[in-house]
Amino acid sequence: MPSQTAPGVFTQALPSYLDPNHLGPWGIYLQQVDRVAPYLGKLGRWVDTLKRPKRTLIVDVPIHLDNGTVAHFEGYRVQHNTSRGPGKGGVRFHQDVTLSEVMALSAWMSIKNAAVNVPYGGAKGGIRVDPKLLSRGELERVTRRYTSEIGIIIGPSKDIPAPDVNTNEQVMAWMMDTYSMNEGATATGVVTGKPVDLGGSLGRREATGRGVFTVGVEAARRIGLDVSRSRVAVQGFGNVGGVAGKLFAEAGARVVAVQDHGGTIYNEAGLHVPALLDHVGRHGSVAGFEGGGQVIPNEDFWGIPCDILIPAALEGQITDKNAGRIQARMVIEGANGPTTPQADDILHDRGVLVLPDVLANAGGVTVSYFEWVQDFSSFFWTEDEINARLVKIMKDAFSAVWQVSEDHKVSLRTATFIIACQRILHARDLRGLYP
């Protein structure tokens, strides 16, 4: 029951998953919100809006396996905030998916969308499943059943899923088709990251990595780092890390180390990025790459001498246990939530510039917005037009964040949260409460 602490003021104990002291992805997000609260001014009265997801859906996903048995998987769709527009965020298939993780990812999507000023709120989804253990038919059945279960809260003007960890264009095609069949009409705008032949956008697959590269170049210019002479280390070498690594290499940088689930390879002279990308595409990881470089222990990755470090795998990778070993001048977060608040402080104290995920990896959702707009208008842009619009939005967003960081003498993460939270809560304030 709520307790009255002062006339007209009521408080209520938070459940454990809403408690900032209950660590995990959601606890990390709450700590980030607490850090930005002093900068919200009159909008601070709405700050609890950011600490409670608008809607959380947990669904059972039963399917027939190929062997004739029935398996059940747990699925989630969380809509964190929709004050600025429909929910937007990916769907991941991973054996370690939890409600805390999906809640945090949905909240970071709210911040990310507001930071680059696209008219979306934040949402996220996931299924606790290892897709590598499923046949193609089983994967399709899981996708379609999950889509049917969450169909009551998604839609082109309500909540638009997209690819994330272990999901891709084909999964989005199945989701779009399932939703469309249930609606009785083709609804291309219900998801983004679709195949181009089904209303997808050119440039979408490379967009997140291109955004990472764009803000990295902008930040390097401001700290006097010559990208063409820099050394880059990348964790995760898929659509984000692989594309970012490729673009940095094309700009003259040496990609000296790459780590993924298959191991870590290192070459001080620089790895041959096109050959490595081809190897990962054919074999699924860096393991077994014979194009130059040595295999080193995974834990040694964090101490590799480099100028730019790009964590582009999963959350919680940079912690207070390894942050002190990082030798990079700049960390560009390609993954969502790869750095804990304690590690953030360590890096800040050591003078390492951190480009936060909610800014650095916003290229994907920006081009998802372009895709959504193109689907509504049935008029599609060229890849050059899309890349040019993406680069402009990312540069403008970075410039605004850099200015707030300078004005308030705060980290780029806090500056990004200041801008984003003010935009979200201003929309909340203007809309008021109904009823």
Image: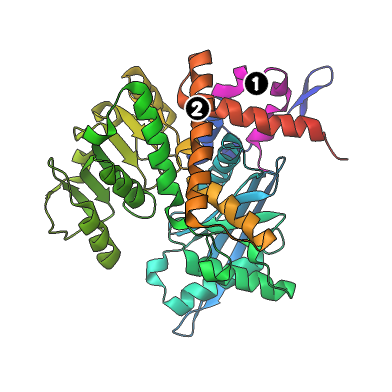
Which numbered circle lies on residue 303?
A: none
Who is closer to the viewer here, 28 or 375? Answer: 375
Who is closer to the viewer here, 34 or 307? Answer: 307
Q: Tell me which corner region of the image, top left, top right, bottom left or bottom right, holds residue 268.
A: top left
Number of residues whose C-alpha sits closer than 10 Å to that of mark 1, classed few (under 14), some (14–19) or many (20 or more): some
Q: Main secondary structure of the magenta part?
A: helix
Q: Residue at x 67, y 27 (%)?
A: 47
> Is residue 270 found inside the magenta-colored segment of the image?
no
- Badge 1 element: loop
What amino acid does circle 1 point to?
Leu
Q: Residue at x 65, y 45 (%)?
A: 120
Q: Residue furthest bottom?
A: 68
Per the rendered image, the range of residues in magenta is 35-53
Q: Position of residue 98 (x, y in %)?
A: 50, 51
What amino acid does circle 2 point to?
Ser
Q: Horizontally, is 279 left or right of 129 in the view?
A: left
- Badge 2 element: helix
Q: Position of residue 285 (x, y in %)?
A: 26, 59
Q: Is residue 388 above or below residue 162?
A: above
Residue with the mark numbered 2: 399
